[in-house]
Amino acid sequence: MKITRSRKVGITILATLSVALLTFIFTSSNMVLFDSKGSIGQAQSSLIITSVLLMAIIIVPVLLMSVYFPYKYRHSNKDAEYKPNWEHSTKIEVIVWAVPCLIILALGWITYQTSYSLDPRKEIASEEKPLTIQVVAMNWKWLFIYPEQQIATVNEIALPVNRPVRFLVTSDTTMNSFFIPQLGSQVYAMAGMENRLHLMAEEKGVYRGISANYSGFGFTNMKFKAHAVDNADFEQWVQKVKASDKVLNDSSYAVLTANAKEQIKTAHPVTYFASVDPLRFKDIIEKHAGVQNGL
Protein backbone atom coordinates (compact mmCIF):
# COMPACT_ATOMS: atom_id res chain seq x y z
CA MET A 1 0.00 0.00 0.00
CA LYS A 2 1.44 3.32 -1.05
CA ILE A 3 1.51 6.06 1.55
CA THR A 4 0.09 9.24 0.07
CA ARG A 5 1.58 12.68 0.66
CA SER A 6 -1.44 13.81 2.66
CA ARG A 7 -1.17 10.78 4.91
CA LYS A 8 2.53 11.45 5.53
CA VAL A 9 1.67 15.02 6.48
CA GLY A 10 -1.03 13.75 8.86
CA ILE A 11 1.38 11.33 10.54
CA THR A 12 3.96 14.09 10.94
CA ILE A 13 1.42 16.45 12.48
CA LEU A 14 0.18 13.72 14.85
CA ALA A 15 3.72 12.94 15.97
CA THR A 16 4.49 16.63 16.51
CA LEU A 17 1.32 17.13 18.56
CA SER A 18 2.12 14.07 20.69
CA VAL A 19 5.60 15.35 21.48
CA ALA A 20 4.23 18.82 22.23
CA LEU A 21 1.56 17.37 24.55
CA LEU A 22 4.09 15.31 26.48
CA THR A 23 6.40 18.32 26.78
CA PHE A 24 3.52 20.44 28.09
CA ILE A 25 2.51 17.82 30.66
CA PHE A 26 6.01 17.43 32.07
CA THR A 27 6.84 21.15 32.10
CA SER A 28 3.52 22.28 33.56
CA SER A 29 3.13 19.60 36.22
CA ASN A 30 4.31 20.11 39.79
CA MET A 31 7.02 17.45 39.74
CA VAL A 32 7.68 17.57 43.47
CA LEU A 33 9.69 14.34 43.46
CA PHE A 34 12.28 16.12 41.32
CA ASP A 35 12.18 19.34 43.34
CA SER A 36 13.62 17.91 46.53
CA LYS A 37 14.39 20.15 49.51
CA GLY A 38 16.23 17.61 51.64
CA SER A 39 19.19 15.25 51.42
CA ILE A 40 16.99 12.14 51.47
CA GLY A 41 14.69 13.49 48.76
CA GLN A 42 17.65 14.48 46.58
CA ALA A 43 19.18 11.03 46.87
CA GLN A 44 15.87 9.42 45.94
CA SER A 45 15.40 11.75 42.95
CA SER A 46 18.87 10.78 41.74
CA LEU A 47 17.99 7.11 42.20
CA ILE A 48 14.82 7.47 40.11
CA ILE A 49 16.64 9.31 37.30
CA THR A 50 19.52 6.80 37.27
CA SER A 51 17.13 3.84 37.12
CA VAL A 52 15.11 5.40 34.27
CA LEU A 53 18.27 6.19 32.26
CA LEU A 54 19.57 2.65 32.69
CA MET A 55 16.28 1.17 31.50
CA ALA A 56 16.15 3.69 28.65
CA ILE A 57 19.24 1.98 27.18
CA ILE A 58 16.84 -0.75 26.05
CA ILE A 59 13.54 1.09 25.83
CA VAL A 60 14.67 3.95 23.57
CA PRO A 61 16.24 1.75 20.84
CA VAL A 62 13.19 -0.55 20.92
CA LEU A 63 10.83 2.40 20.45
CA LEU A 64 12.95 3.76 17.60
CA MET A 65 13.09 0.37 15.90
CA SER A 66 9.33 -0.07 16.23
CA VAL A 67 9.01 2.98 13.98
CA TYR A 68 12.05 2.45 11.74
CA PHE A 69 11.46 -1.21 10.80
CA PRO A 70 7.84 -0.84 9.63
CA TYR A 71 8.84 2.26 7.68
CA LYS A 72 11.89 0.64 6.05
CA TYR A 73 10.16 -2.63 5.15
CA ARG A 74 6.87 -1.12 4.05
CA HIS A 75 5.24 -2.60 0.97
CA SER A 76 5.99 0.43 -1.20
CA ASN A 77 9.75 0.37 -0.50
CA LYS A 78 11.13 -1.79 -3.30
CA ASP A 79 14.74 -1.18 -2.25
CA ALA A 80 14.42 -2.87 1.16
CA GLU A 81 16.53 -5.97 1.77
CA TYR A 82 14.79 -9.28 1.40
CA LYS A 83 16.43 -12.35 3.02
CA PRO A 84 13.90 -15.18 3.17
CA ASN A 85 16.57 -17.74 4.26
CA TRP A 86 18.00 -15.69 7.14
CA GLU A 87 17.38 -17.28 10.55
CA HIS A 88 20.19 -16.51 13.01
CA SER A 89 22.74 -13.86 13.98
CA THR A 90 25.23 -14.44 16.79
CA LYS A 91 25.89 -10.70 17.07
CA ILE A 92 22.21 -9.95 17.60
CA GLU A 93 21.88 -12.76 20.16
CA VAL A 94 24.85 -11.43 22.13
CA ILE A 95 23.48 -7.87 22.13
CA VAL A 96 19.87 -8.74 23.05
CA TRP A 97 21.00 -10.93 25.97
CA ALA A 98 24.16 -9.23 27.24
CA VAL A 99 22.82 -5.68 27.42
CA PRO A 100 19.71 -6.53 29.54
CA CYS A 101 21.81 -8.71 31.84
CA LEU A 102 24.30 -5.89 32.40
CA ILE A 103 21.46 -3.47 33.11
CA ILE A 104 19.90 -5.89 35.61
CA LEU A 105 23.27 -6.29 37.35
CA ALA A 106 23.67 -2.50 37.55
CA LEU A 107 20.15 -2.02 38.91
CA GLY A 108 20.68 -4.84 41.40
CA TRP A 109 23.87 -3.24 42.72
CA ILE A 110 22.19 0.17 43.03
CA THR A 111 19.22 -1.41 44.83
CA TYR A 112 21.55 -3.23 47.24
CA GLN A 113 23.40 -0.02 48.12
CA THR A 114 20.38 2.26 48.48
CA SER A 115 18.43 -0.31 50.51
CA TYR A 116 20.88 0.50 53.30
CA SER A 117 21.87 4.11 52.57
CA LEU A 118 18.22 5.23 52.17
CA ASP A 119 16.74 3.08 54.94
CA PRO A 120 14.03 5.35 56.44
CA ARG A 121 14.90 4.11 59.94
CA LYS A 122 18.54 5.15 59.56
CA GLU A 123 19.36 8.31 61.51
CA ILE A 124 20.70 11.32 59.62
CA ALA A 125 24.23 12.31 60.64
CA SER A 126 24.16 15.83 62.09
CA GLU A 127 25.54 17.88 64.95
CA GLU A 128 21.98 18.98 65.73
CA LYS A 129 19.85 16.96 68.12
CA PRO A 130 16.96 15.30 66.25
CA LEU A 131 13.47 16.71 66.76
CA THR A 132 10.88 14.03 67.58
CA ILE A 133 7.40 14.23 66.10
CA GLN A 134 4.83 11.52 66.81
CA VAL A 135 2.44 10.98 63.89
CA VAL A 136 -1.02 9.43 64.18
CA ALA A 137 -3.12 8.73 61.08
CA MET A 138 -6.82 9.20 61.80
CA ASN A 139 -10.06 9.32 59.83
CA TRP A 140 -9.50 11.62 57.84
CA LYS A 141 -6.76 13.76 59.29
CA TRP A 142 -3.26 13.70 60.72
CA LEU A 143 -2.52 14.21 64.40
CA PHE A 144 1.01 15.37 65.30
CA ILE A 145 2.40 15.25 68.84
CA TYR A 146 5.60 17.03 69.90
CA PRO A 147 6.57 15.14 73.08
CA GLU A 148 9.50 17.43 73.96
CA GLN A 149 7.46 20.62 73.49
CA GLN A 150 4.33 18.94 74.96
CA ILE A 151 2.06 20.27 72.21
CA ALA A 152 -0.06 18.70 69.48
CA THR A 153 -1.51 19.82 66.15
CA VAL A 154 -3.86 18.56 63.49
CA ASN A 155 -2.95 18.79 59.77
CA GLU A 156 0.09 21.03 60.29
CA ILE A 157 3.67 20.65 61.43
CA ALA A 158 6.70 22.90 61.69
CA LEU A 159 10.31 21.74 61.61
CA PRO A 160 13.60 23.63 61.83
CA VAL A 161 15.77 23.80 58.71
CA ASN A 162 18.97 21.70 58.77
CA ARG A 163 17.85 19.79 61.85
CA PRO A 164 17.07 16.07 61.59
CA VAL A 165 13.50 15.07 62.41
CA ARG A 166 12.59 11.67 63.84
CA PHE A 167 9.01 10.78 62.91
CA LEU A 168 7.37 8.04 64.98
CA VAL A 169 4.40 6.91 62.92
CA THR A 170 1.32 4.88 63.84
CA SER A 171 -2.40 4.77 63.02
CA ASP A 172 -5.59 4.87 65.04
CA THR A 173 -7.57 3.55 62.10
CA THR A 174 -6.88 1.79 58.79
CA MET A 175 -3.43 1.65 57.23
CA ASN A 176 -2.16 4.89 55.70
CA SER A 177 1.17 6.07 54.31
CA PHE A 178 2.93 9.14 55.71
CA PHE A 179 4.66 11.04 52.90
CA ILE A 180 6.23 14.48 52.39
CA PRO A 181 7.34 14.11 48.74
CA GLN A 182 9.86 16.98 48.66
CA LEU A 183 11.65 15.74 51.77
CA GLY A 184 11.90 12.03 51.03
CA SER A 185 10.76 8.56 51.97
CA GLN A 186 7.25 7.48 52.82
CA VAL A 187 6.44 4.92 55.50
CA TYR A 188 3.27 3.09 56.38
CA ALA A 189 1.16 4.05 59.38
CA MET A 190 -0.32 0.89 60.87
CA ALA A 191 -2.50 0.42 63.94
CA GLY A 192 -0.77 -1.18 66.91
CA MET A 193 2.70 -0.58 65.44
CA GLU A 194 5.33 2.17 65.49
CA ASN A 195 7.21 2.92 62.28
CA ARG A 196 10.15 5.31 62.08
CA LEU A 197 11.22 7.82 59.48
CA HIS A 198 14.15 10.26 59.51
CA LEU A 199 14.03 13.37 57.32
CA MET A 200 15.67 16.78 57.19
CA ALA A 201 14.68 19.95 55.32
CA GLU A 202 17.55 21.97 53.87
CA GLU A 203 15.51 24.92 52.57
CA LYS A 204 12.81 27.04 54.14
CA GLY A 205 9.38 26.61 52.62
CA VAL A 206 5.92 25.08 52.92
CA TYR A 207 5.82 21.47 51.75
CA ARG A 208 2.81 19.33 50.97
CA GLY A 209 2.20 16.24 53.09
CA ILE A 210 -0.14 13.45 52.02
CA SER A 211 -1.19 9.89 52.56
CA ALA A 212 0.19 7.76 49.73
CA ASN A 213 -2.07 4.82 50.55
CA TYR A 214 -5.79 4.81 49.73
CA SER A 215 -7.72 4.38 52.97
CA GLY A 216 -11.38 5.08 52.31
CA PHE A 217 -13.91 7.70 51.27
CA GLY A 218 -12.18 10.60 53.05
CA PHE A 219 -8.74 9.77 51.63
CA THR A 220 -8.52 12.99 49.59
CA ASN A 221 -8.61 15.01 52.82
CA MET A 222 -5.60 13.23 54.32
CA LYS A 223 -3.38 16.24 53.63
CA PHE A 224 -1.26 18.51 55.77
CA LYS A 225 1.34 21.27 55.46
CA ALA A 226 4.93 21.00 56.67
CA HIS A 227 6.51 24.39 57.40
CA ALA A 228 10.32 24.33 57.22
CA VAL A 229 11.52 27.38 59.16
CA ASP A 230 14.60 28.65 60.97
CA ASN A 231 15.08 28.05 64.70
CA ALA A 232 13.66 31.42 65.74
CA ASP A 233 10.49 30.97 63.68
CA PHE A 234 10.12 27.44 64.99
CA GLU A 235 10.17 28.67 68.59
CA GLN A 236 7.59 31.33 67.68
CA TRP A 237 5.40 28.65 66.13
CA VAL A 238 5.67 26.53 69.28
CA GLN A 239 4.62 29.51 71.41
CA LYS A 240 1.72 30.13 69.03
CA VAL A 241 0.51 26.56 69.54
CA LYS A 242 0.94 26.85 73.32
CA ALA A 243 -1.24 29.96 73.27
CA SER A 244 -4.21 27.88 72.09
CA ASP A 245 -7.16 27.44 74.43
CA LYS A 246 -7.45 23.75 73.54
CA VAL A 247 -5.77 20.79 75.25
CA LEU A 248 -5.53 17.22 73.97
CA ASN A 249 -7.06 15.08 76.69
CA ASP A 250 -9.43 12.10 76.67
CA SER A 251 -12.51 14.18 75.86
CA SER A 252 -10.94 16.27 73.07
CA TYR A 253 -9.36 13.16 71.57
CA ALA A 254 -12.77 11.46 71.62
CA VAL A 255 -14.14 14.42 69.65
CA LEU A 256 -11.37 14.02 67.04
CA THR A 257 -12.27 10.37 66.71
CA ALA A 258 -16.05 10.90 66.68
CA ASN A 259 -16.28 13.53 63.93
CA ALA A 260 -14.62 11.37 61.28
CA LYS A 261 -17.74 11.32 59.07
CA GLU A 262 -17.63 15.11 58.74
CA GLN A 263 -14.14 14.92 57.16
CA ILE A 264 -15.25 12.65 54.32
CA LYS A 265 -16.37 15.72 52.35
CA THR A 266 -14.69 18.54 54.28
CA ALA A 267 -11.09 18.53 55.43
CA HIS A 268 -10.49 18.97 59.16
CA PRO A 269 -9.20 22.49 59.90
CA VAL A 270 -5.73 23.05 61.31
CA THR A 271 -6.04 22.75 65.08
CA TYR A 272 -3.58 23.54 67.88
CA PHE A 273 -3.46 21.91 71.32
CA ALA A 274 -1.49 23.78 74.00
CA SER A 275 -0.79 20.62 75.97
CA VAL A 276 -1.01 16.87 75.52
CA ASP A 277 -0.85 13.78 77.68
CA PRO A 278 2.78 12.54 77.34
CA LEU A 279 1.52 8.94 77.11
CA ARG A 280 -1.09 9.66 74.42
CA PHE A 281 0.98 8.19 71.56
CA LYS A 282 1.85 5.09 73.60
CA ASP A 283 -1.79 4.60 74.57
CA ILE A 284 -2.91 4.78 70.92
CA ILE A 285 -0.47 2.04 69.93
CA GLU A 286 -1.36 -0.20 72.88
CA LYS A 287 -5.07 0.21 72.20
CA HIS A 288 -4.63 -1.73 68.93
CA ALA A 289 -1.71 -3.96 69.94
CA GLY A 290 -4.00 -6.30 71.86
CA VAL A 291 -6.26 -6.68 68.80
CA GLN A 292 -3.29 -7.66 66.61
CA ASN A 293 -2.22 -10.25 69.18
CA GLY A 294 -5.69 -11.72 69.23
CA LEU A 295 -6.53 -10.52 72.73
Image (tube, grey):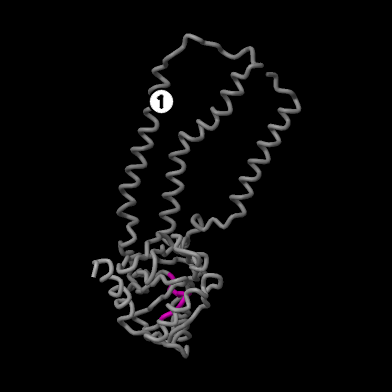
What secondary structure do most residues of the magenta stretch adopt?
A: strand
Q: Look at mark 1 in the image and give the residue it sits on.
A: 95
Q: Position of residue 55 (x, y in %)?
A: 44, 39
Report the magenta residues as a range: 152-161
262 relative to 187 in the view: left or right: right
Q: Position of residue 75 (x, y in %)?
A: 63, 17
The crowding category of the residue bearing disc 1, from other C-alpha atoms within 10 Å (few below 14, some 14 to 19, many at least 20), is few
Residue 26 vertical position relative to residue 193 in the rendered view, above or below: above
Q: Position of residue 288 (x, y in %)?
A: 30, 71
Q: Is residue 157 magenta?
A: yes
Residue type beneath disc 1: Ile
Residues 11 and 55: in front is 11
Q: Position of residue 250 (x, y in %)?
A: 37, 85
The residue located at (48%, 85%) in the rendering is: 240
Disc 1 is placed on an element classified as helix
The residue located at (30%, 67%) in the rendering is: 193
The residue located at (28%, 69%) in the rendering is: 291
Considering the image in quadrants, where does the C terminus appear?
bottom left
167 relative to 33 in the view: left or right: left
Q: Hey, which quadrant is residue 187 in on the image?
A: bottom left
Residues 259 and 81: in front is 259
Residue 176 vertical position relative to residue 149 in the rendered view, above or below: above
